[in-house]
Image (cartoon, grey):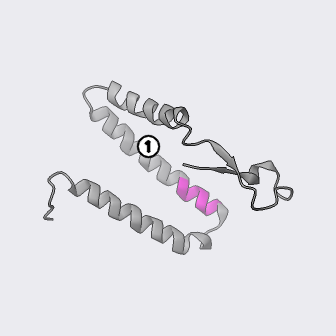
Amino acid sequence: MPVLVPGLTGTLINTITVVIGSLVGLFIGHRLSAHMQKTVLHGLGLVTLAVAMSNALMTRNILVPLFAVAGGAILPLATSITRPSIDRSRSCSAGGRSTCLLYTS
């Protein structure tokens, strides 16, 4: 596969698969039961965890993935990227307080 920028092939493949997976989820996700959606999500999470563990074990310095995970957890909190905001556009009385919180990213 010819690529204009060397080393970009993996990024392009990842981007394409994420877009395809998102489109598949949008078009057939509503046809799956809530239990099936949860099961698929857990399966994808386990695969992601396995890939992450494999990559972490291949590194010569385990501190790199450690700081990457810690930074990925701390940075959004420190910059208030994930602060909750209240959705005032709909009534909150039917679903309780949790239905009114939207987490922005």
Between 11 and 46, which is closer to the camera in this rendering? 11
Q: Residue at x 54, y 55 (%)?
A: 41
Q: In which quadrant of the rendered image does the N terminus lie?
A: bottom left
Image spot of residue 95 (x, y percent): 81, 56
Chief secondary structure of the magenta span? helix
- Is 101 displayed left or right of 73 in the figure? right
Image spot of residue 50 (x, y percent): 40, 43
Magenta includes 38? yes
- Residue type at mark 1: give it: Leu
Query: In the structure shown, which secondary structural element does the residue marked by tag 1 occupy?
Result: helix
Between 95 and 100, which is closer to the camera in this rendering? 100
51 to 57, vertically: above or below:
below
Image spot of residue 87 (x, y percent): 72, 55
- Is 90 displayed left or right of 64 in the figure? right
Instruction: Answer with the quarter of the image where residue 10 lies.
Output: bottom left
Image spot of residue 103 (x, y percent): 62, 49
- Is 45 displayed left or right of 13 in the figure? right
Instruction: Answer with the quarter of the image where residue 68 lies.
Output: top left
Q: Check disc 1 and report the residue beneath it.
A: 49
Crowd class of label 1 (few under 14; some 14 to 19; many from 20; radius 10 Å):
few
Q: Residue at x 46, y 70 (%)?
A: 23
Q: Residue at x 39, y 28 (%)?
A: 67
Residue numbers of the magenta segment: 35-41
- Is 85 displayed left or right of 50 in the figure? right
Q: For the image shown, how many numbered marks are present on the structure?
A: 1
87 to 23, vertically: above or below:
above
Magenta includes 29? no
Q: Residue at x 51, y 67 (%)?
A: 25
Q: Residue furthest right?
A: 93
